Structure formats: structure tokens, C-alpha cells
Image (tube, grey):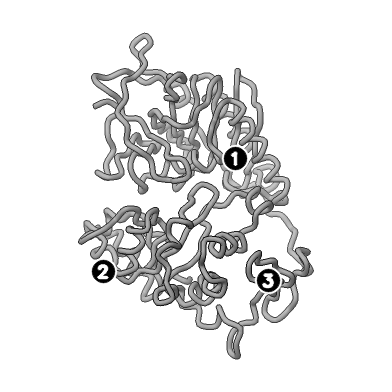
Amino acid sequence: MLGIAEMMNYPGVLAADPEVLDKIRIAAGRPVDGHAPGLNGRDLCAYIGAGIRSDHECTSADEAREKLRLGMYIMVRQGSTEKNLKELVSIITPENSRRFMLVSDDRNPGDLLSEGHVDYLLRMAIAAGVPPLTAIQMTTINTATCFGLSDMGAVAPGYRADFAVLEDLEQVTVTHVFKDGELVAEEGKLLAEADRSLPPVRKEDDPGVHGSVNIDHRSLERLGVEAGDGDMKVIGIVPGQIVTEKLLLEPKMEEGLAVADPDRDILKIAVVERHRASGNIGLGFVQGMGLEGGAIATSIAHDSHNIIVVGDNDTDMRAAVLAVERGAGGAAVVSGGETLASLPLPVAGLMSVLPAAEVARAAADVIAAAQDLGCPLEHPLTALSFLALPVVPALKLTDLGLVDVERFQLVKLFE
């Protein structure tokens, strides 16, 4: 075990919650990764003092500068939805560059195939003014040092011979890849033998395999939202970020129920528990998805990975959840009761056994179907998945209800 990944429950760290601190203690001196968006001042000092040494959630140069000065490694993130690289590399200098790393966080298969992975991050950093050798350090020796990998990250005696040969230092074109001294890829072609055997993913293939999606269908009959007094809290999507806004908007009312209002881009959102068929369902509203005449659902819903669905009508929302269930997990877009596109992810409702290119094509179809219904987002599935992550401000939804992340508590929908 390298260490503890993403100590997301930063309020628990600050409150010295015994269970949270026990999780940090089991690292036993190994690295503990951080996840503390917007944390600063004395709270940030306490968080770092608990033994947490890195963070990948910086969205501004000022935030990264403060965390850097307090001793943290800064992971400069550029994912499919989380785009922070250009802002953060502005503070990199020759004196502090060894404390930075380039990371992708969530990256969609289509982007991996069309743009690349860490090579893409290198190209972006170099284009933004980071010297090529400094950028390469940020993906090699800096990362190895941060995680205590003393035999990796350099081409030198005593280090593992894991390295890539580049054609140039601007476009970062990789010609050869070596693993443990063996040539495993050349000119974009894999030379090494890969284990292509597939694990069982369905109960009928192996009785010991449990289904990925277990829903109490009665929860899907509870999509109605009873109106309350005053304005209602609405999750506001911030394009290109996983943080959200906490909006207070007047609800649209029909027969005593608060309903979606596509004219103002206010859609209903639900999180359906899908692991134990508990019947839990959280309901709320979101602005920024832009759908009209349909719904989109996915079982990738950080970090509990229940089914999250957004739509402008309950019928299509139910149908989208059921379409995800039929795929044993994944994603689906529904309009008028018809499934327009779907992406089955039968391994835990999160992964596919198909080649990346096939997964990318199916994901592209789902994205295109959502955009055809009016969604303005470049990556609607990724954006949707983070609306269930209750440790990133400001307002998120779980199967237990609406979470005010800044207060770290469940809150009522209406003020």
C-alpha cells in the first residue's frame, strides 16, 4: 500500500473525528493525499498538521500559493471537466517547481484516445510557458518523490528502467516505451502481451458474482417534490469545475408540487440508492444541465456511486434509471420514454470489459444525445457524476438528501 488516497472528509479532520483520524493513522508514515477545496487559514494549517501533504483541488492561483507555502505538494489538475492547469501553472518558478505535479483526475475515454493522457498535460503546460524539462519533472521525479517511490522517476543507476523516448520536447511525441528495461510499445503500438481474459460480470456467468445494480423500484414512485414555503435551494453547475453554486430560486408550482422549469433551466435531480435496494432516494433541483424533453442518468456518481438522474419530467427520469439498471450500470439518455443512447458498465456499474475505443464510441453517443436535448456542457456525464459528491462545495445531492457542504449537513430543500 502506497498510502491513503484523498482525505475528502476535511470537516471530520478539523473536528478530530476519531474514525477519520484512525484512517490517517493506518498510513503509518506513508503519504496521505488531500482533498480540500477552498480550505485556508487556520483550518488549512490544522488539516496539514494531521499529516496530509498534497492537494489536487486548487482552482485559483491564490489557493495553490497558500497551500504551497504551508508545505503541500500541489497537483495541477486538468481533467475532462476539471480544468485548472492554465490558472495554476502561473505560480510555478524555478525555486518551487519541485513541489508541483501534473494530474488528470477524471479523464474520459474519448479524451484519452483523441488527446492523450499525461502527454496531453505536458503539452498544455509547455504551451502555457512551463520549461519542458520542468514540466517533465512534474510528471516523473516530483511524483515519485511525493509518494516515496525511491526507485522510480529518473533514468539513473539504481532506478527502475521505466521510461519513454520522445521525438521532441514541445509536442511530446512518444516513439518508444520501456517497462523494467523491456520495450513494450513502439510508434503507438503495444508490443507486450496483455492478459485479455475477462472476469465474470453477470450472475448467470458466475453465481458468486453479485449484480451491480440493486434498486427498490418503489423509490421511483416517490419522485414528486412537495412544495414548501419560500424559495428553494438549487444546485448551480459551474462549467469546467466540480464546485457548484448554492442558488435560491422561486419554484415552479403545479398542484402543490415543485416541478422542473426548463424555461429557466431548472431541472429535477434525484439520487437513487442502488447497492442494497434500501429504497433511499434524494430529490432536488439543478440549474445548468439545459435538458428539454428528457432525462440523463448514470451509475457513476462520486463517491458512493448510486444512480444519479436529471430530467424535466418524472416519466423519463424513471425510464433513464431503469435503462441504467438494464445495462447492469452505466449511463442512458431517454426522451419520450425511448432510450436514445446508452453505455453499459457491468463491472460494479463503473467499468466495461470492452476496448477503450468501443467504450468511447458509446460514451460519445450518450453525450451527443444529451446535447441534442439541449445540454450545453461538453462533458455532461462527468459533470453529472460530481453532483453527488458531498465533500466539494457548495451544494450536492445524495440518496439521503440535499447536502450543504459548507455547513457539512443535510438541509431542507426550501428556505
- Residue 93 placed where, x, y %? 42, 72
- Residue 258 lies in what quarter of the image? top left
* Residue 82 locus on image (x, y percent): 48, 50
- Of residues 347 and 389, which is closer to you in this image? 389
The residue labelled by disc 3 is 168
Give how far across and how far down residue 114 sits, in percent: 68, 51
The three-letter code of the residue at mark 1 reads Gly
Please, what secondary structure does the residue beneath circle 3 have?
loop
Q: Which amino acid, mark 2?
A: Gly
Q: Secondary structure at mark 2?
A: helix
Left or right relative to 295: residue 238: left
Front position among marks 2 and 1: 2
- Residue found 41% across the figure and 31% down from its top: 281
What residue sits 69% from the left and 72% below the top? 166
Which of label 1 and label 3 is nearer to you?
A: 3
Tell me the distance, in whole angstroms, between the alpha carbons under discs 2 and 3.
42 Å
Report if the CB atoms under discs 2 and 1 are less than 8 Å apart: no
